[in-house]
Image (cartoon, rainbow, N blue to C red):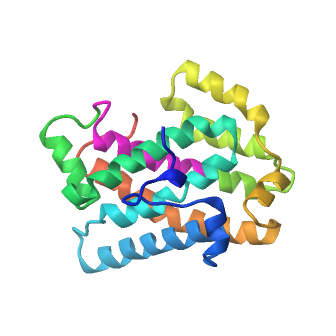
Amino acid sequence: MDIFSYFTSDKISFEDDEFEDAGAGTALSLIANAFEELSDLIKKGNKKDASFELDLKPFCEACSLISVLFGSLGIAFKFAEMEYTSKVNDLLDAASLYGTLSKVIDCDVKTDTVTSAESLTRKLRRVRQGLDLIRELFQNFLATDDYSLKEAASSAYKQVCAPYHTWAVRTAVSAGMCALPTRDQLLLSLNENDESAENEMRRYIKASLPVIKYIDNLYTSRGITLDW
C-alpha cells in the first residue's frame, strides 16, 4: 500500500525533508496551521450559514499531514498509518465528485450503505478517529514530563480506537507499543524541542476539536450513531 510520501502528482505529496526544504516549518507546525485554517473555516461558515458545508479537498489536504506523525510512532502505529492514509486517499479521490463532507454522507444514507465496509461514510468515520487519536495522544504527552510516549500512546489508543478494533488488532498494537520511540527520540525525529513541541501540539489540540465536532454532527444530525 502506498503512503502519502509516495503519492503521484494528482495526490498530496510530502516527504520528511520537504518540510525543511520548503522553509514552511516543521511537520507539527504545518499540521497545526492546516487545522487552524479548517477550524476557522468551520467557525466562520457556521456564523454565516447554519447549513455550512466543509469542502472535502482542503479537509483531506489537512488530514494527509497527520500521516507523518503515525510514521514517527513506529511499528505500533503502522496499522493506523496504513488504514488512515488509505482512507484519506479514497476521500481525496472522491472530492471532485462529491465536493463536501456532508454530500458524501447524504449519498450513503440514500443508498443505505453508511456502515458498509467500503463506504466513504465509514472511511470518514475512521479518519475522524485518527484525528482524535492524535489529539488524545498529544494531550497525554503534555500531561506531565514523566508520562512516557508508551503510556501516552497506550492510553490514547484504548480511549479512541480499541473499542472498535478486533482482539487480534488490539493484541498486535499492544505488542508493538514496546517498540515506540522515547519522548526525546520522537521530538528529534519531528525536529522539535520540548517547548516548540508543546506549542504546536496545543495548537493542534485546540484546532482539531471544532473539526472533530463538525464531523460528529454530520452523523448525529442524520440520526447516525457514533458507536461503530
Q: Residue at x 79, y 45 (%)?
A: 181
Q: Residue at x 45, y 64 (%)?
A: 210
For the image shown, how many numbered marks are present on the structure? 0
Frontmost residue, 224 versus 170 = 170
Q: Residue at x 44, y 47 (%)?
A: 127
x, y percentage for residue 89? 39, 49
Q: Does residue 196 appear anywhere in the picture?
A: yes
Identity of the residue furthest to the top in this view? 168
Q: Quadrant of residue 156?
A: top right
Bounds of the magenta segment:
116-135
- Quarter of the C terminus within the rendering: top left
Name the residue at 43% across, 70% down: 38
Does 79 sit above or below residue 148?
A: above
Specify whether residue 133 is painted magenta: yes
Up-down relation of residue 170 to residue 94 (above or below): above
Residue 117 x %, y %:
32, 30
Q: Residue furthest left?
A: 110
Does residue 102 appear to the left or right of 28 in the view shown? left
Q: Nearer the viewer, residue 120 or 15?
A: 15
Look at the image and tell me whether residue 225 can be seen: no
Q: Can you give x and y, in whole percent of width and height, for residue 174 in the image? A: 69, 28
Left or right for 182, reference 98: right
Looking at the image, residue 106 lies above or below residue 63: above
Q: Magenta part mainly helix, strand or loop?
A: helix
Q: Position of residue 197 (x, y in %)?
A: 73, 66
